[in-house]
Image (cartoon, rainbow, N blue to C red):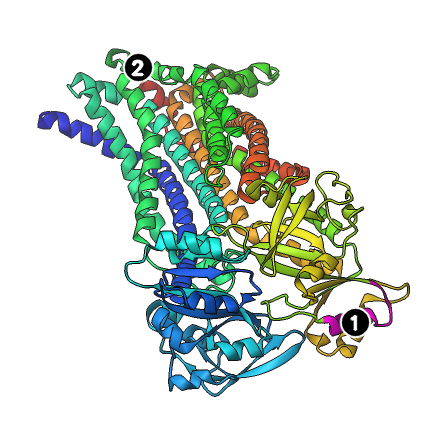
């Protein structure tokens, strides 16, 4: 191409960006916001996961295999058997305790090890200062630098921990000396015998780390060893342990990433609408360039480069903004964003080059996809026709076919019924994306039908507004694309969150029938009530009835996190009085296995369907139960089982309790009884006592905090949609300046033209609201019945927040109408007569 051909082309494209500075800036900001949200979520969650992995790796050290069992521990005699195996070079016994601090509502991880054995397996957790023999003292511990800074203590200070309902005091002997990533981990280390004695874990181990002799086939040895171990113990590779730890939060992190992509997708739609309207307006210029010799491929390349430039600028702005958002969010809500998945983790925000590159590429890709279709359409236009005035309507003719939209909707329907992939609702997400894209492709038809059904107004200005929209449903649909997409996703999330919140509230009412609840280990796992404590509580004046509960964590599948076992007082003939069953339970039959009731996760993940006989590891032996029912549980997504407490005590000999539900005699107030409980039971002041109302209030507060990020992402998407509506409507108005000039020549006042534009904005906003509400409702069904069910195994009924949706719809309607009016008035400025002359 000659210089004379290149210069006009560059002038046209550079001039378009400069002329449409406001719309280009909005598109850039939309991409920047989407990239910032995505990068911020990646920074926070990936940093927290990496920190968890570093902690697990630090504590695994050079171990080839790890033997783990119940959270409470397993018989330490297993250690001696493992140490004598000919394939084992070193066996290191470990006791891990999340010890509750007596002076604050937090827990510190205590690692009890044999210092001489551990030095060969986990050297990073070796003695942090002083003489190695200091670690053999039973009443001292060594803190990591992060733990010391967190607690504000140093060598020579003492820390008090709760054990059962009593308190022990341990002296901090040393701080520091942990290299690399270990310096950022919060933990304390002490002699294993001292830890077992101090925290009442005599004869128990949490895990055993194994280093194998050179030449031993780790995989084959693992299989042989697993077959020899007692029930309830799992043999894991160190890397498998890391994967299990990361898998606990995997579904949550992916859902957060999807939410961040929503804003980026809406930004891509904004680029699409901006480019479509910009390309349509410049059709005569492109036709002239084609006549002068520019090829179709060259035109497409220049238009795609224009969109890519918007994406690159937006991504470049979004990356540092994402870092700032991550920093602020971590300070305000913590690394778990309110979810509780990363409680106790103190990550350091790192660069994450892979996430940075991915988010940057996604921003550019969103802009590229948004600009590709308009570029292809511009290249297909015949130059001779495009040079004529009024040819703009041809650009939207390709939006009329319904075949592609219906095909996508059919594919979305098929995806709804597909099973999860690796435990993730990938087809559910695909169904939402296909449904959204299919609806957007059908939007011109929907707009045309909706406009055709509207009655003709009496006044001239509204009549002209309706006639204009009826004559050009394609541009109207492009204008509505971003707002329909963002509004539908906001409605879907609002319905899903409201349904979950109402279901959680109803569930809390069902599971909290007593008047008062007591917990001994709200933070950590070192607190409990022994048999003497339980007897004292049951004998207190004012107690009508008391039910004690024991919570344990068991390994059922080595590849999955521990599941929760709840041993509680329950009537097998009427389990529905204590559990929110999802369907009627099986009645006990003579000579059958004892009953067990499981939550929905156990059905979906482990296949524990009603009537199935299963073996559960208790005290190193397999105990057989029959699944008698399924109950709803929003607190334990890893899986939970309930058995009768009397049977649990008979099988394990464990009479301790971690919680209690109390019914009080008439005339006894909860406040009076709580004061007596704290005063009359030794250690009662360390019990967490709460009424059902207080528990519900705290739980719902945690729920709202968890979904605060969701609300922010929804608002961001809607803000982008409103910006898109403003940008697109402004472009349409500017392209109609000749029309406004003709109307002014025919005697129409500026006020009447403004009324016409406000009416168009109102009609478009109303149609967009209807489309967004309908589409959002359908998407919410997929979120509730497919995505949440497959991600977290929670069942819930749909609950529509009518008042909140009505308020949001009214607000969007008012803002959209005002946006159209302001944009129209700005377009009416200048010389409209000259705009008419330009077409002569």
**Residue 535 magenta-highlighted:** yes
Q: Is residue 669 above or below residue 286?
A: below
Image location of residue 45, percent across then percent down: 44, 54
Tell which residue pokes out farthest to the left in this image: 2
Pointer 1: what residue?
A: 535
Describe residue 822's horizontal placement relative to residue 284 as left or right: right
Residue at 56% from the left image edge and 50% from the top image edge: 638
Q: Nearer the viewer, residue 744 or 468?
A: 468
Residue at 77% from the left image edge and 46% from the top image edge: 576
> Which numbered tag is attached to residue 840?
2
Task: Locate the N terminus by quadrant.
Answer: top left
Q: Nearer the viewer, residue 199 or 362?
A: 199
Task: Locate the C terminus by quadrant.
Answer: top left
The reply to whether residue 158 is visible in this rendering is yes
Image location of residue 229, percent across then percent down: 50, 58
Q: Is residue 112 above or below residue 333?
A: below
Question: What is the quadrant of residue 490 in the picture?
Answer: top right
The reply to whether residue 51 is visible in this rendering is no
Image location of residue 135, percent across then percent down: 44, 82
Describe residue 710's horizontal placement relative to residue 238 as left or right: right
**What is the span of residues highlighted in magenta in the rendered image?**
531-545
Q: Is residue 206 above or below residue 489?
A: below
Residue at 55% from the left image edge and 75% from the top image edge: 196
């Amino acid at each position: 191409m000659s210089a004379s051909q290149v210069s006009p082309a560059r002038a046209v494209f550079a001039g378009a960006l400069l002329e449409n500075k406001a719309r280009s800036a909005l598109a850039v900001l939309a991409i920047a916001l989407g990239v910032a949200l995505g990068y911020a979520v990646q920074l926070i969650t990936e940093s927290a996961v990496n920190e968890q992995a570093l902690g697990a790796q630090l504590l695994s050290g050079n171990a080839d295999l790890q033997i783990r069992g119940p959270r409470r521990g397993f018989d330490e005699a297993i250690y001696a058997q493992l140490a004598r195996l000919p394939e084992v070079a070193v066996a290191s016994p470990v006791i891990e305790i999340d010890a509750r601090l007596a002076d604050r509502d937090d827990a510190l991880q205590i690692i009890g090890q044999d210092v001489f054995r551990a030095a060969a397996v986990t050297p990073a957790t070796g003695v942090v200062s002083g003489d190695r023999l200091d670690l053999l003292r039973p009443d001292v511990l060594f803190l990591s630098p992060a733990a010391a800074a967190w607690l504000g203590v140093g060598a020579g200070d003492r820390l008090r921990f709760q054990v059962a309902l009593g308190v022990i005091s341990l002296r901090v002997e040393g701080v520091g000396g942990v290299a690399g990533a270990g310096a950022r981990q919060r933990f304390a280390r002490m002699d294993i015998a001292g830890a077992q004695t101090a925290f009442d874990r005599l004869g128990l181990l949490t895990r055993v780390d194994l280093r194998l002799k050179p030449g031993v086939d780790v995989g084959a040895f693992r299989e042989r060893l697993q077959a020899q171990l007692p029930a309830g113990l799992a043999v894991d590779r160190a890397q498998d342990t890391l994967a299990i730890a990361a898998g606990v939060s995997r579904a949550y992190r992916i859902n957060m990433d999807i939410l961040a992509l929503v804003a980026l997708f809406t930004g891509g739609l904004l680029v699409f609408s901006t480019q479509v309207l910009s390309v349509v307006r410049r059709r005569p210029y492109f036709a002239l360039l084609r006549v002068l010799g520019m090829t179709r491929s060259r035109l497409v390349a220049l238009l795609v480069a224009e969109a890519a430039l918007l994406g690159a600028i937006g991504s470049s702005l979004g990356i540092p903004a994402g870092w700032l958002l991550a920093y602020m969010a971590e300070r305000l809500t913590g690394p778990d964003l309110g979810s509780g998945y990363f409680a106790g983790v103190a990550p350091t925000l790192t660069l994450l080059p892979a996430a940075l590159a991915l988010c940057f590429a996604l921003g550019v890709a969103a802009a590229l996809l948004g600009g590709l279709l308009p570029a292809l359409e511009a290249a297909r236009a015949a130059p001779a026709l495009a040079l004529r005035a009024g040819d703009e309507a041809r650009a939207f003719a390709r939006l009329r076919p319904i075949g592609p939209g219906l095909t996508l909707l059919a594919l979305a329907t098929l995806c709804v019924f597909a099973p999860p992939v690796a435990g993730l609702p990938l087809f559910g997400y695909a169904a939402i994306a296909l449904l959204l894209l299919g609806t957007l492709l059908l939007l011109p038809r929907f707009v045309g039908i909706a406009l055709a059904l509207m009655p003709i107004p009496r006044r001239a200005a509204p009549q002209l507004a309706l006639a204009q929209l009826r004559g050009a449903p394609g541009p109207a649909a492009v204008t509505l694309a971003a707002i329909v997409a963002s509004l539908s996703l906001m409605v879907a999330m609002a319905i899903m969150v409201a349904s979950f919140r109402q279901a959680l509230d109803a569930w809390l009412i069902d599971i909290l029938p007593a008047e008062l609840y007591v917990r001994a280990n709200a933070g950590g796992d070192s607190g409990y009530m022994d048999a003497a404590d339980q007897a004292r509580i049951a004998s207190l004046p004012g107690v009508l009835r008391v039910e004690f509960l024991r919570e344990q964590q068991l390994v059922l599948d080595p590849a999955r996190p521990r599941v929760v076992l709840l041993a509680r007082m329950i009537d097998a003939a009427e389990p529905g009085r204590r559990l929110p069953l999802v369907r009627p339970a099986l009645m006990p039959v003579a000579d059958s296995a004892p009953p067990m009731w499981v939550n929905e996760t156990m059905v979906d993940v482990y296949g524990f369907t009603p009537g199935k006989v299963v073996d559960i590891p208790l005290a190193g032996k397999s105990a057989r139960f029959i699944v008698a029912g399924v109950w709803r549980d929003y607190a334990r997504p890893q899986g939970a089982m309930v058995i009768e407490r009397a049977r649990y005590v008979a099988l394990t000999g464990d009479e301790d309790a971690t919680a209690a539900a109390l019914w009080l005699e008439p005339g006894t107030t909860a406040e009076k009884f709580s004061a007596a409980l704290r005063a009359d039971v030794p250690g009662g002041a360390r019990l967490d006592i709460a009424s059902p109302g207080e528990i519900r209030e705290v739980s719902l507060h945690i729920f709202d905090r968890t979904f605060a990020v969701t609300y922010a992402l929804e608002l961001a998407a809607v803000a982008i949609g409103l910006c898109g509506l403003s940008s697109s409507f402004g472009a349409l108005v500017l392209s109609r300046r000749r029309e406004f000039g003709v109307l002014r020549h025919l005697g129409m006042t500026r006020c009447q033209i403004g009324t016409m534009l406000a009416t168009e904005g109102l009609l478009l906003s109303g149609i967009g609201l209807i489309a967004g509400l309908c589409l959002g409702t359908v998407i919410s069904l997929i979120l509730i019945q497919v995505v949440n069910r497959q991600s977290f195994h929670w069942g819930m009924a749909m609950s529509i927040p009518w008042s909140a949706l009505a308020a949001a719809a009214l607000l969007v309607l008012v803002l959209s109408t005002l946006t159209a009016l302001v944009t129209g008035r700005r377009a009416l400025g200048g010389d409209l007569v000259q705009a008419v002359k330009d077409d002569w």
